Each structure stands twice: as structure tokens, then as C-alpha cells.
Amino acid sequence: MSVKLNNRQVGDVTVMDCTGRITLGEGASTFRDAIRDMATKGDKKILVNLSDVSYIDSSGIGEMVSSYTTVTNHGGQLKLLGLSKRVKDLLQITKLYTVFEVFDDEAAAIRSFT
Amino acid sequence: MAERDILLDSTLDSVEIAEDAVLHDAQEIGFREEELHQIGMAVRESMVNAVVHGNRYNSRKKVHLSVTKAPDRLIVVIADEGEGFDLNSLPNPLAEENLLRQSGRGLLLIQAFVDELQVSRAQPVGTEVRMVKYLAKAS
């Protein structure tokens, strides 16, 4: 299964709920295209909910980094919510914990946007 | 020691085939869920490197997968038929200036998930990645 994405609005924050796998091929490109669309459309506060993502590989990680850069370059913020232990481990191994703001609680994540 | 050898096409479907085959063997010798996940990721990353960066999806080039099952370990060798690369020339993905690069983390993840990793020139051409994962001793 590839990734399924669903956007919902919580105040001025767009929450993107992701379900499935973000891996090389369809999953990673679907993720990239969705974030680019949001950034181009002018969404400035994006919370990526990874609670239901079962698998991310290095290509998926690469797309997340690239998405972070895209949103930041458009003057926005991209944060992560609901990482499984495995995804947290990936961020530790790759040192990307120093790049992404990561939350376990959605309300706290929403409040953190300025 | 039991061994399996498979010759795979340079396609993304081969990534799934290799991952499934190796996980089947790993399960047979007793690896648990978390270790299976790590082995699967290491094989996936190595196969992606072979198909995408090594063989560059060239339909005339193959990826060679060999799996050896020993009582205490699993040995996986993945070799492509590409031009090869100098390991020392790869940018360090953990360096501050490289953290926001889109790619270049595959080998780092493989290294994190297996116990031994060797990358060498394959003969006559290509790159060979040899990975060993040991069964954790029961406590």
C-alpha cells in the first residue's frame, strides 16, 4: 500500500493525516506533490500527522526534508506529529531531530505555531 | 549453511521481491519482529542503491542477491553491475551542511541496522554490499 493523504483545517493550521507507507516511488512522490501544492497555495502552517504511517525509507525521509525546505522557503512552518518509535529512530539516526519540531500531542502541536 | 541466489531486474519491483525473500529466510532462522524490520530496511536501502544509483534502471543490467542462512546469523550480499563509486567521496549525511540534502542517507541506515557492513568493488564491474545480522542470544 502506498500513502493516503487527507487534509483538514484546525484554525489556521492545515493538518495532513498520512496513512500507509512513504517509500521510494508512488508514496514519496505523492507526499512531495501534496506539500508543494499546499506551499504554492499559500498554506503557511502545516502539521504532518504520521500516526498511521507504518514505514518510511530513506527516500521518504528525503521527501520530508525536501518538503520542510519548500515550506520554509515559502515563509511557512512544517512540523511533525505522532511519530512511531521506528520513525523516531530514523530521525535520531539521521540527526534530523535537530531539524524537525516533533510532537506527540496534536493540541500542543497546533498551539506551537506562531 | 543454506544459500539462495537470485538474479533480479533493475526495477523497483525487485526491491520488494528481494525484501520478501530475505525476510522469509530471516524468519526461518528465528529473527524477531524488530530485527526483521531492520533487516528489511537494510535490504530495501541496498536494493534501491543497486537499482537506482548502480544500474540506473538499465534493463540489460541485473542485481545479484545472495542470502546465506547460518544458525547464528544471516548474510546478505547485493551486487549491481553499475560503474561503482568511491565510498570516501560520498558526503557525510550527518554533517551540519548536509542535513537538509534530499538524498544520501541509505548507507547510513544500512549501517545502523546490520551488525557488519562491507562495500566493495564487484567483479568484473559494479558494487557489492555484504551485510551480516547476528541472532541476538537468548538472555
Image (spheres, coloured by chain):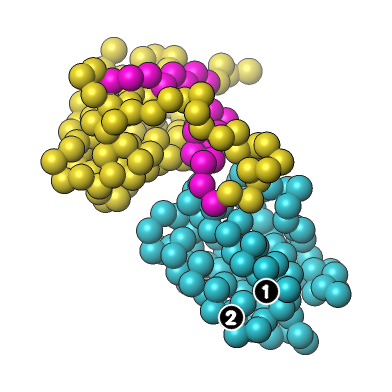
Chain colours: A cyan, B yellow
Q: Is residue A59 magenta?
A: no
Q: Looking at the picture, tell me which residue is in the foreground, A107 or B86.
A: B86
- Badge 1 marks a residue whose secondary structure is loop
Q: Residue A44 appears at what percent x and percent y?
A: 71, 78
According to the image, label 2 marks what residue?
A40
Compared to A68, does B37 lie above or below? above
In the rendered structure, which amino acid carries the disc numbered 2? Answer: Thr
A88 displayed left or right of A66: right
A71 displayed left or right of A28: right
Q: Looking at the picture, tell me which residue is in the foreground, A87 or B87.
A: B87
Q: Which mark is residue A74?
A: 1
Query: Mark 1 or mark 2, which has the lower sequence index?
Result: 2
Region in magenta: B102-122
Q: Residue at x 61, y 67 (%)?
A: A70
Within-10-Å neighbours for mark 1: few <14, some 14–19, many 20+: some
Within-10-Å neighbours for mark 2: few <14, some 14–19, many 20+: few
Q: Looking at the picture, tell me which residue is in the foreground, B37 or A31.
A: A31
Q: Which mark is residue B96?
A: none
Tags 1 and 2 touching, CB below 8 Å: yes
Compared to A46, does A97 lie above or below? above
Q: Is residue B108 magenta?
A: yes
Q: Residue at x 60, y 33 (%)?
A: B92
Instruction: Tell which subunit mark 1 falls on.
Output: A
